[in-house]
Amino acid sequence: MRIKNLKLSLILIGISGAFVACSKDDDKLEETPNYGRMSINAKASYSPEAGKNGAQRSSSDIELSRFLVNFKEIELEYDDIIDDGDNIYNGEDEIELKGPFEVDLLSPVPIPLVEFRVPNGRLEEIEFEFDKSSNPDSEIYNQSMRMDGTINGTPFVFWHDFEDEIELEFDDDNNNSVINGDLNHILINFDLNAVFDPETGVDLSLAADGNGNGIIEIGPRDEDGNNALAEAIKRAIKNQIELLEDHYD
């Protein structure tokens, strides 16, 4: 089901800044009976030491400088909604937030994506959709994901243009999934340490600079012959997305 009469517009405040959701029903952050507030945040967990696990596991020295992603939309699904008082939601059990949300997640602190008013109730899952950026001024124009860094000192770029939806379920005992007139936080974490651990993800020592231009290019269509590796990285990233449900406790 979709909420058709709740229109949210999003204002971008920098590539690694915040988004603010507004609507005719949500112009201020004031307290409202039967409503609370939800803050959705995201980050990437990464340590330069993650790819240095000994010669028996990987010969790669990996350094990352950027990890850009583009979310087309974010959706929250309720297990149960308490009466919202003004019937804005009309019994619907999903809230859809239109993006795009374009952010650099390689940050030591969570990146705020959006904060908005939500009816009291219990959340069941969060869903977000990757899609190609349609902004010609964007650094990831026509891409849904991009990563820059070095492999053993050689510059590399990984990019992809896939479109896909990711669903993450809340634990039943997660306090942040219960809206009760307060401010709740959600943190979506991309575990890049696991992605680039050869035992749990991808071994980047296999990446090659096939055309010899001094840059290792890893993408679904590249000139270095790393197409299969690009698919493996994409799958590994999708498998290492999680909700850190106790981060704000």
Image (cartoon, helix red, strand yellow):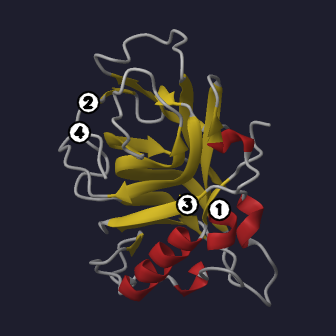
* Residue carrying label 3: 168
Front label number (3 vs 4): 4
Q: Earlier in the sequence, mark 4 or mark 1?
A: 4
Side of 212 where 35 appears, left or right: right
Closer to us: 163 or 234 = 163
Identify the disc placed on residue 7. 2
* Residue carrying label 4: 4
Label 3: state its secondary structure.
strand
Q: Where in the figure is residue 41, as x and y percent of width and height? A: 56, 39
Q: Where in the figure is residue 206, as x and y percent of width and height? A: 54, 87
Label 2: state its secondary structure.
loop
Closer to us: 10 or 25 = 25
Give me the residue at 48% from left, 82% from top: 232
Residue 249 lies, with reference to residue 196, above or below; the image says above
Front label number (4 vs 2): 4
Q: Are marks 3 and 4 in contact (CB under 8 Å)?
A: no
Q: Are marks 4 and 2 in contact (CB under 8 Å)?
A: no
Identify the disc placed on residue 191. 1
Amino acid type, residue under disc 1 in the picture: Asp
Q: Earlier in the sequence, mark 2 or mark 3?
A: 2
Distance between the alpha carbons at the discs numbered 2 and 3: 24 Å
Whether residue 107 is visible here, answered yes or no, is no
Amino acid type, residue under disc 4 in the picture: Lys
Front label number (1 vs 2): 2
Distance between the alpha carbons at the discs numbered 4 and 2: 7 Å
